[in-house]
Amino acid sequence: MPKDLPPPNATKPRRRRLPPEQRRTEIVDTAGRLIATHGIRSLTLRSVADALGVATGLISHYFASVDDLVTEGFAHASTNSLDAWRAHARVASTPLGQLRRLLDYRRHRTEFPVPLLWVDGWQASYSEPRMRDEVVRQMTYAQTIVTEIIAEGVAAGQFSTDNANASASRILATAHAVTIQAVLQNDEEFLRIADFVLATAEQELGLPPHALENRRDQ
C-alpha cells in the first residue's frame, strides 16, 4: 500500500509568532551577526530573512531599506562588542590590570573577532551620513571605556597624564592599525603593531617598558 503523504509543511514547522518589538530585536541581532561575520556589503533583506527562516516581506515590514537595517545591525553588534571588551577589562582589580586586559590584542584576536565590523563601518560612513553618526557614537563609547580606566589609574597613582581623554584618543589611534592588520590577516605585521600599541600606551601613561605585557593580574 502506498504510504500516506504528509500534510503540507509537515516537515517544516512554522515559526512562532513574536510580539513586534521582540521580532524587531531578533532581526537586528541577526543583521549584526551577519555583518560581523560576512561584512556590510553582503547584507540584504533576503539574507536576514533566510537566516531567520522567514519571508523577505517580514523583514521589509520592519525595515523599508537595507541601509536602515545595516545601521541598526552595526550599532547592535558594535555595542555588544564594546560591552564585552569593557567587561573583559573590568575583571582585573586594578586600573593597570584592566588596561593590560583591554589592550591584549593577541587574546582579543580569538575571543573578540570583529575587525571586519569596524573596517566596514568606517568605509560605509564615508558615504552614509546615518552610518557616520553611528560610527562616531560607537568610537566615542570606545574612547569613554579607555578614558575611565586611565582616569582611575591616575587617581590611584598608577598612570601619569595631564589629560586622560586625550591619552585615550592617542592610544586608540594606534589600536585602529591592529584592526586593519587583523582584517588583512598578516600575522607578522599584526603582532608588530600590537606590540607598538602597548609601547605607545606605556609611554603615554608614564609606565616602564613592558608594564602592559600580558601577565596574571593580582
Image (cartoon, rainbow, N blue to C red):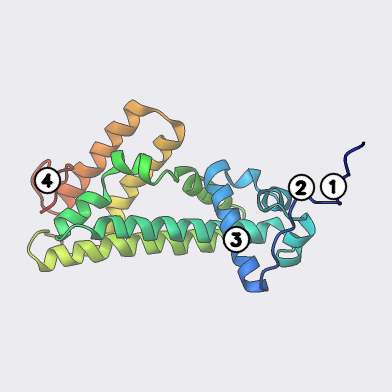
Give the mark nearer the N terminus: 1 vs 2. Answer: 1
Spatial separation of the CA atoms under disc 4 and disc 2: 59 Å
- What residue is rendered at 33% in x and 60% in y? 143
Which residue is most to the right?
Answer: 1
Spatial separation of the CA atoms under disc 4 and disc 1: 67 Å
Q: Decide: marks 4, 1 in contact (CB < 8 A)?
A: no
Q: Position of residue 93 (x, y in %)?
A: 15, 61
Read off the residue under disc 2: 11
145 shown above or below 35 = below
Q: Secondary structure at mark 4?
A: loop
Q: Which mark is residue 198?
A: none
Give the mark nearer the N terminus: 3 vs 2. Answer: 2
Q: Secondary structure at mark 1?
A: loop
175 shown above or below 151 = above
Tell me the quarter of the image containing the C terminus: bottom left
Tell me the quarter of the image containing the N terminus: top right
Read off the residue under disc 4: 211
Foreground: disc 4 or disc 1: 1
Q: Decide: marks 1, 2 in contact (CB < 8 A)?
A: yes
Give the mark nearer the N terminus: 4 vs 2. Answer: 2
Density class for disc 4 (Cα within 10 Å; few <14, some 14-19, many ≥20) is some
Residue 165 seen by the camera: no
Q: Secondary structure at mark 2?
A: loop
Q: Position of residue 150 (x, y in %)?
A: 20, 61
Spatial separation of the CA atoms under disc 3 and disc 2: 28 Å
Q: Which mark is residue 6?
A: 1
Q: Which mark is residue 28?
A: 3
> What amino acid is found at the position of numbered circle 1 in the picture?
Pro
> What amino acid is found at the position of numbered circle 3 in the picture?
Val
> What amino acid is found at the position of numbered circle 4 in the picture?
Ala
Q: Decide: marks 3, 2 in contact (CB < 8 A)?
A: no
